[in-house]
Image (cartoon, rainbow, N blue to C red):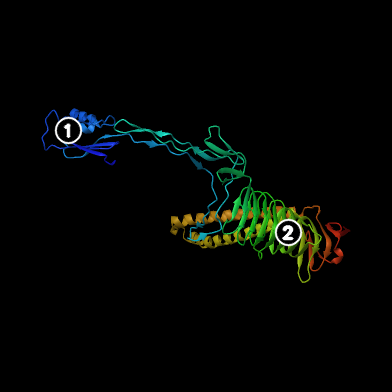
Amino acid sequence: MASVDKKLVDKHFEFEISPMELWLTIRPEAGLGPAEFDSLSVIKRIRDLGVVHGILEDVVDEMVRKKLYNLKTLVAEGRPVLNGSDARIEILFEQVEEIHPTEMEDGKVDYKNLQTIQMIAPGDILAKRYPATPGEAGKDIFGKDLPAVAGKEMKFHAGPNTSISPDELELSATKRGHAFRERDMICVEETYRLTGNVDFNSGNIAYGGDVFIEGNVTDGFRVEAGGKIFISGNVEGAEIISHEGDIIIEGGVFGGDRSFIKAKTDITVTMAQSAHFECEGILLFMKSLLNCTVRAGKIEAKSPTAIACGGSIIAFESMILSIVGSVGTKTELAILDAKAEACQRQLEESEKNRVKVLQGKEAVEKQLKPKLAWLKRYPESISEKSKQEMQRLSETLEKATKLLGHLDAEEVRLKEELAASWEPKGFLIVTGKVVWGVHLNMYGHFRELSESDSKHKITWSHDEGFSLISA
């Protein structure tokens, strides 16, 4: 109800007047004549007050017809102003400016898996703009126009790798990457960049493209990328995984066997201690590999003073080291055939599966044997439920037998592949010095290296066994 600007009382009527509302109370105490008390007369009295807009004639007619006396009633109202709404922009991509821990099903809070960086494809709509509206003018009961205030306009600001539609209502990505806001711009960048450490502030990083981290990756955290990973600092007891690219770590890798680094292609690291590395390409190290576990296509030391000692270092093509071994520390080097290694792993997995299937088969036979004996002696006493259970056990036993047959055939195939002739092409070169305690395995043939093996290219062949050629 609007505030009352003026109250007017005459013989039969009491009016409360404001620019937007007129309220009427009919007072019958003084007596009303038939001519005075009809709807047309009341409406005329309202118009005499200067009211020209919004008269509620049906309401007036009802007041008169139903003799609604001494009841204040709204009989005229203006049209209110509807101011325009401001333009707004709806963001359609996930924003990581604010990240929060996740509560797990058991009620515990996960402070590490805070975010997965959303991967944007070209053409993805990142934001929609809803233009400002002009609003609708109003009018008071005296016919005065009341202008509306138009909403404030807002425009898109396209950042790198984005474009605005011709009607300026949508903003889309033009490149693959991740979307983010920088001041008032919406941008897309192919590489996800983190300035700072991967820790409880950032959470684990998971992104489908390249990742650039200007800092350390701290203990217990994980960086996973579809593309390349670059880390300017250290990796301390963390997991770094690149599914399709390489990994470059400018600092060191430490963490008491908890650091695991895996790349589809190459890995480059300055130094590492008690870490695990896997890559299909080349593992390059600048200073040292101390007590590490390495499996790579090739392994190369990039400095004449770089040292590899302790742990297990396996290459499937070649190994070029500068200094290897250390007094009091056993260092295991291996040049293996990748296909033969894969066959061997499959054989080991097949054997594990065989043990599980046999254990399950024996358990089923143990349950089924007494039931079958009882059925043979007392066939009429077996219930329908017992028959169904025996049928189920028999079918399980048949499946286990078939699976064992498949495993037998697979093992025969794998053993044939292992026995097939192949040409060993791998080699080891120690360009600096073999110190002490270095054991070499080349395709299952073993040799303890000595200082005299330094500066030689070591190979193995079916015909000649180990061969040394001056490097």
Crowd rating for badge 2 (residues with CA inside 10 Å; few <14, some 14–19, many 20+)? many
SS of the residue under disc 1: helix
- The residue wearing badge 1 is 64
28 is higher (above) or lower (below) than 100: above
Residue 224: % across, % down: 62, 53
> Is residue 409 among what the camera can see?
no
Crowd rating for badge 1 (residues with CA inside 10 Å; few <14, some 14–19, many 20+)? some
Residue 393: % across, % down: 52, 56
343 is higher (above) or lower (below) than 452: above
Residue 178: % across, % down: 59, 46
- Identity of the residue furthest to the right in this view: 470
> Is residue 370 among what the camera can see?
yes
Q: Quadrant of the C terminus?
A: bottom right
- The residue wearing badge 2 is 270
343 left or right, relative to 370: right
- Identity of the residue furthest to the bottom in this view: 328
* Residue at x 85%, y 66% (from the top left corner): 451
Given residues 174 and 354, the one toward you in this image is 174
3D distance between C-alphas at marks 2 and 1: 97 Å
Q: Which residue type carries mark 2?
A: Thr
* Residue at x 59%, y 59% (from the top left corner): 199
Given residues 327 and 346, the one toward you in this image is 327
SS of the residue under disc 2: strand
Q: Earlier in the sequence, mark 2 or mark 1?
A: 1
Q: Which residue type carries mark 1?
A: Val
